[in-house]
Amino acid sequence: MKLSKLLIASDNPGKLAEYQELLSGLGIEIVSMRDAGIERAPEETGSTFEENALIKARYCWNMTGISSIADDSGLEVAALGGEPGVRSKRWAGEQISDAERNKLLIERLNKASSSNKSARFVCVIALIDRYGNEHLFRGEVEGVIIDHPRGSHGFGYDPIFYLPELGKTFAELDMLEKNRVSHRARAAQLAVDWIKRNLDKL
């Protein structure tokens, strides 16, 4: 059976655009939560990326019956004990801007006892097929936090997450470049590979 729709459990324009690109060419209609008539996302109460991704995917699948993908992603900074982690978006408060959040993280890191500025982005994708079976895919990318934001692409912590091997921050990568190396791209590629092998389950 050919998959006709896949609900992305997000209304974040940047995230939806990334998924549209990552899943292009599969003959799948990408549906946002708003498209599906879901007005708000469930509260993310999990203590891991896996738990939060499943909370969102289950919610959308239960509401619509459409095969659903959700992800939870975040930044783990070694010198901050893995923070912001699963609280990456809410770490400094709900109303704070990306720029303000990045500034606060840099300040916290510069005050840390360790001079280690290594960090990693983590993304876990949860996919629930039409039978209600749950599948998890994890992607990670290693980098370094820099003191001054660079670049105008991306969102969130992208301007301060530097990739030494490319000499650029995530925010200096165009979408094509980012979709080759990002944590979400790596997790999504695993999900896409699974979809290609299991269209009959969707």
Image (tube, rainbow, N blue to C red):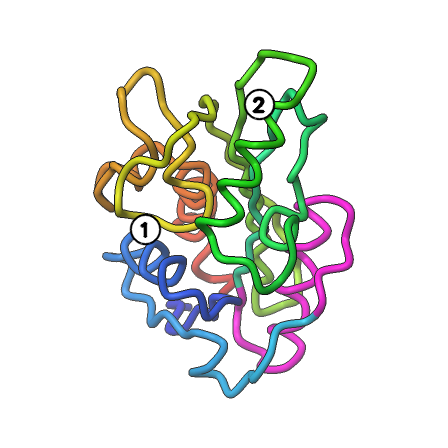
Type of residue at label 2?
Answer: Asn
Depth check, front residue: 72 or 117: 117
32 vs 122, left or right, is left
Depth check, front residue: 124 or 83: 83
The residue wearing badge 1 is 22
149 vs 88, left or right, is left
85 vs 168, left or right, is right
Depth check, front residue: 170 or 50: 170
Vertical order, 18 against 42 (above or below): above
Q: Which residue lies furthest to the bottom in this view?
A: 37
Residue 167: quarter of image = top left
Residue shown at the point (46%, 22%) measured from the top left: 144
- Check residue 54 for magenta coloring: yes
The spot of residue 180 in percent (x, y) is 29, 35
The spot of residue 191 in percent (x, y) is 47, 47
Residue shown at the point (40%, 68%) measured from the top left: 3
186 vs 113, left or right, is left
The residue wearing badge 2 is 110
Residue stretch in magenta = 43-68
Secondary structure under the numbered disc 1 in the rendered image:
helix
Type of residue at label 1?
Answer: Leu
- Check residue 45 for magenta coloring: yes
Q: Nearer the viewer, mark 1 or mark 2?
A: 2
Vertical order, 180 against 55 (above or below): above
